[in-house]
């Protein structure tokens, strides 16, 4: 065991520091480096292959190494992206990268790069340094993310103010009129709630007025009836909304408002002093405080109108709370500005619950928690919001139910408590935890997304929304769909009246196809695009893509796979056999300059290694199966069948000639009775039918082609017409030919032989470049006789 370990160490040098890395790159030779992280270790599955390669090549320039990315600064980009990853360095330059334990590809790359390195050292070539395409993509994404964050910081969020329609105006029935006046001034109402304030809330809200003589009367007035609370903004930025709204409502004193601003809302609807109908935030700081007071979960919209970069978290409703309060909890979640990106009801087994809460193992409450979680269905939700993790945990309140009821009575754990020992809801505590927990309930999945020809002008906006929703575009391609691919997309609609119109539309112009990766990608994308009919989408899902960009059921902007199986089938048809990393990125990438489909559109897979088969090949296959091409192929097949039929009599005649030359075969055949021959023919009838079918689509026997190149060159038509099964079925055909020979006069046979010879010579004249000398023909006949002698025992079996 120690000897084996020593051999492995000698085979793969271990690099564990930046100094060792730099020293390695300074040395001559080709270094094949297995980059790994400590948590997963190097790829031990390749060690035996490396030993074999090293022993077979015996080249001192070839060296194998392992490099721990955790300890080497130059490999920091590979942390989290190196399982498994092999880097090829020569002369300090990165010359190749292979991702995945792909032994044939690694061997091929070693052979190619070792040959190239010898040329470089001999002065016959120069090294071609490359950049790892996956790392280049990561860096590009980081730059894009940094740029987006900078833009978001510059854009900021809209300015918002808080307004109160006080109890006097509500009691007087002035709410609708006030709202109309507010909207007429171009002010947008972002939030609107009717609520009756408690005495504590009023005292806290008006704490800045507690030293005023009228403070107690104010408290009594504000708690006398319901108020309406509003969050307001204006225009693209909300700039000056606070001052503009205060100008709209007028001075605090109603009499002063009537004198100085008779058109103001307080002048029109107020009564006296603090009974002045409305309240408005006095400053930006006050607006922030009042927003937090009335709408603690409110998120101000961004200046440019685009959704902010969303954060995701897992929300888990435990069995009893799910059974009793499901709808109320979901309603509270939506009211707080969360988007429910994913939703799943499922029954956890005890083993699943133990796995999910394994970090709590050893705690006194662990068994009770696991029992509770596996006692019935749970509701798992993927929530999205700008501050999803902290926002959701804030809504949940303290973990201990008693503490939640005492300190945060409005929290969800306090309101929906069922068991005082186990709280009713769960939330992720960090981004890393959220990622792991979401993957537990919503494993990584792929779906196909299509931006239709009618939405080509809004492609960039739709792609922005895809990124914002947390999808990764694992592969993408812009092309004009063939009818076959379009029919595959809409196979479920084949019986619909609009089916043909739909297929025609999908083939009418450029279509943008994508493979999207995310947890629960299929349902997530279908939820995001909304109902098929844009009119219905605007009613039930106004923020959906089809509601925003769709025109009609036919021109509804986008398409999505109906289920995971349909997604897999479509991905294979368009992108070929894509494989995916655990993070959803594809294993294969495309050289866009070198590989383009026949429409001239490049397929792009933003991932980790060069594909050995272009993604666009599958599209070519689909396009080659179009009706026009199929008709052409059918015509060619018919022509070949006709040629085969013409050649068949010639082959039969040759068999008769060769049968005459083999008396031993005749003698053996004569010994059989006609009844036995008839029984054998009936038994072999299926084989003969198969032979006839194979004759229609002839394919020469590989061994014959390799063994007799002269025959193939001289008589290509015969070689093509001779099916593999013809040789295998020869004993039965010999029996048939024998019976024919016995029934037909010898003169007729000789006449056929002469005609066959004449036709063969005419064929030779037409293919002069492939003519043969007379002695070659004799050789061929002798080979045919030898072939028959070898085949004869098989027929006896």
Image (cartoon, helix red, strand yellow):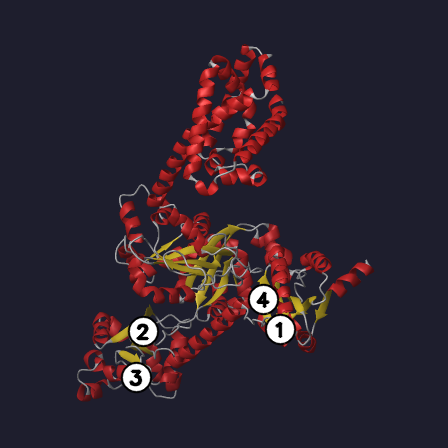
Mark 2–mark 1 distance (CA, rounded to whole Å): 78 Å
Q: Mark 3 = which residue?
A: 240
Q: Mark 3 against mark 1, which lies toward the viewer?
A: 1
Q: Is residue 247 above or below residue 526?
A: below
Q: Earlier in the sequence, mark 4 or mark 3?
A: 4
Q: Mark 4 = which residue?
A: 96
- Locate the C terminus by quadrant: top right
Mark 1–mark 4 distance (CA, rounded to whole Å): 20 Å
Q: Earlier in the sequence, mark 2 or mark 3?
A: 2
Q: Mark 2 against mark 3, which lies toward the viewer?
A: 3
For label 2, the SS is: strand
Mark 4–mark 3 distance (CA, rounded to whole Å): 58 Å
Q: Mark 1 = which residue?
A: 123
Give residue 481's mark. Answer: none
Mark 2–mark 3 distance (CA, rounded to whole Å): 17 Å
Q: Is residue 307 above or below residue 441?
A: below
Q: Is residue 673 left or right of residue 631?
A: right
Q: Is residue 449 above or below residue 264?
A: above
Is residue 735 visible in the rendered image? The answer is yes
Q: Earlier in the sequence, mark 3 or mark 1?
A: 1
Label 2 Cα neighbours within 10 Å, binned few <14 / some 14-19 / many ≥20: many
Q: Mark 2 = which residue?
A: 230
């Amino acid at each position: 065991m120690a000897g084996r370990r020593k051999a492995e160490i000698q085979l793969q040098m271990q690099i564990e520091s930046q100094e060792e890395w730099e020293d390695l790159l300074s040395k001559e030779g080709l270094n094949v480096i297995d980059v790994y992280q400590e948590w997963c270790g190097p790829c031990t599955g390749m060690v035996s292959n490396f030993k074999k390669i090293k022993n077979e090549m015996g080249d001192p320039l070839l060296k194998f190494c392992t490099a721990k990315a955790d300890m080497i600064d130059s490999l920091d980009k590979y942390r989290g992206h190196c399982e498994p990853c092999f880097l090829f360095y020569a002369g300090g330059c990165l010359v190749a990268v292979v991702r995945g334990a792909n032994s044939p590809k690694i061997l091929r790359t070693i052979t190619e790069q070792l040959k190239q390195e010898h040329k470089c050292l001999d002065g016959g070539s120069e090294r071609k340094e490359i950049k790892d395409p996956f790392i280049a993509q990561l860096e590009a994404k980081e730059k894009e993310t940094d740029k987006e964050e900078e833009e978001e910081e510059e854009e900021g969020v809209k300015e918002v103010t808080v307004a109160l329609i006080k109890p006097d105006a509500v009691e007087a029935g002035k709410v609708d009129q006030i709202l109309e006046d507010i909207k007429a001034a171009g002010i947008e109402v972002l939030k609107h709630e009717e609520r009756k304030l408690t005495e504590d809330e009023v005292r806290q809200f008006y704490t800045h007025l507690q030293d005023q003589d009228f403070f107690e009367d104010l408290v009594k007035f504000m708690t006398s009836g319901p108020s309406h609370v509003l969050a307001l903004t204006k225009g693209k930025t909300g700039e000056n909304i606070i001052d503009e709204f205060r100008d709209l409502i007028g001075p605090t004193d109603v009499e002063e408002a009537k004198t100085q601003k008779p058109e103001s809302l307080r002048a029109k609807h107020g009564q006296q002093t603090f009974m002045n109908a409305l309240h408005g935030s006095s400053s930006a700081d006050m607006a922030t405080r009042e927003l937090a007071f009335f709408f603690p979960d409110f998120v101000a919209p961004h200046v440019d109108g685009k959704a902010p970069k969303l954060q995701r978290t897992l929300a888990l409703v435990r069995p009893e709370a799910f059974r009793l309060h499901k709808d109320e909890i979901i309603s509270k979640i939506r009211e707080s500005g969360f988007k429910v990106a994913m939703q799943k009801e499922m029954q956890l087994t005890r083993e699943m619950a133990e796995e999910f809460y394994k970090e709590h193992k050893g705690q006194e409450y662990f068994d009770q928690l696991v029992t509770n979680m596996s006692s019935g269905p749970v509701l798992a939700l993927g929530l999205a919001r700008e501050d999803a993790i902290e926002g959701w945990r804030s809504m949940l309140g303290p973990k201990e139910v008693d503490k939640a009821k005492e300190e945060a009575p409005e929290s969800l754990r306090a309101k929906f408590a069922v068991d005082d020992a186990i709280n009713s809801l769960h939330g992720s505590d960090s981004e890393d935890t959220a990622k792991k927990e979401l993957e537990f309930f919503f494993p990584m999945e792929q779906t196909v997304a299509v931006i239709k020809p009618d939405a080509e002008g809004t492609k960039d906006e739709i792609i922005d929304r895809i990124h914002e929703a947390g999808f990764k575009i694992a592969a993408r391609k812009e092309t004009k769909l063939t009818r076959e691919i379009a029919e595959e997309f809409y196979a479920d609609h084949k019986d619909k009246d609009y089916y043909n119109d739909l297929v025609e539309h999908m083939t009418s112009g450029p279509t943008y196809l994508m493979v999207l990766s995310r947890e629960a990608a299929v349902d997530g994308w279908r939820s995001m695009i909304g109902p098929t009919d844009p009119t219905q989408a605007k009613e039930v899902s106004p923020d959906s893509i089809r509601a925003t960009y769709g025109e009609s059921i036919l021109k509804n902007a986008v398409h999505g796979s109906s289920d995971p199986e349909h997604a897999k089938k479509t991905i294979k048809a368009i992108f070929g056999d894509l494989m995916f990393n655990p993070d959803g990125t594809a294993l294969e990438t495309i050289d866009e300059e070198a590989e383009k489909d026949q429409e001239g559109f490049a397929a792009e897979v933003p991932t980790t290694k060069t594909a050995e088969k272009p993604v666009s090949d599958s599209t070519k296959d689909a396009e080659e199966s179009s009706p026009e091409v199929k008709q052409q192929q059918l015509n060619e097949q018919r022509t070949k069948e006709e040629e085969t039929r013409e050649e068949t009599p010639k082959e039969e005649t040759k068999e008769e000639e060769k049968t005459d030359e083999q008396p031993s075969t005749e003698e053996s055949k004569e010994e059989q009775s006609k009844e036995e021959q008839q029984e054998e023919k009936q038994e072999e009838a299926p084989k003969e039918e198969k032979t006839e079918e194979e004759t229609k689509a002839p394919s020469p026997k590989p061994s014959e082609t390799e063994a007799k190149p002269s025959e193939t060159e001289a008589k290509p038509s015969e070689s093509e017409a001779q099916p593999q099964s013809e040789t295998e079925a020869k004993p039965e055909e010999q029996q048939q030919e024998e019976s024919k020979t016995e029934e037909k006069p010898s003169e007729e046979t000789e006449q056929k032989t002469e005609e066959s010879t004449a036709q063969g010579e005419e064929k030779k004249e037409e293919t002069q470049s492939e003519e043969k000398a007379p002695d070659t023909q004799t050789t061929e006949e002798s080979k045919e006789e030898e072939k028959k002698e070898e085949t004869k025992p098989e027929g006896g079996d």
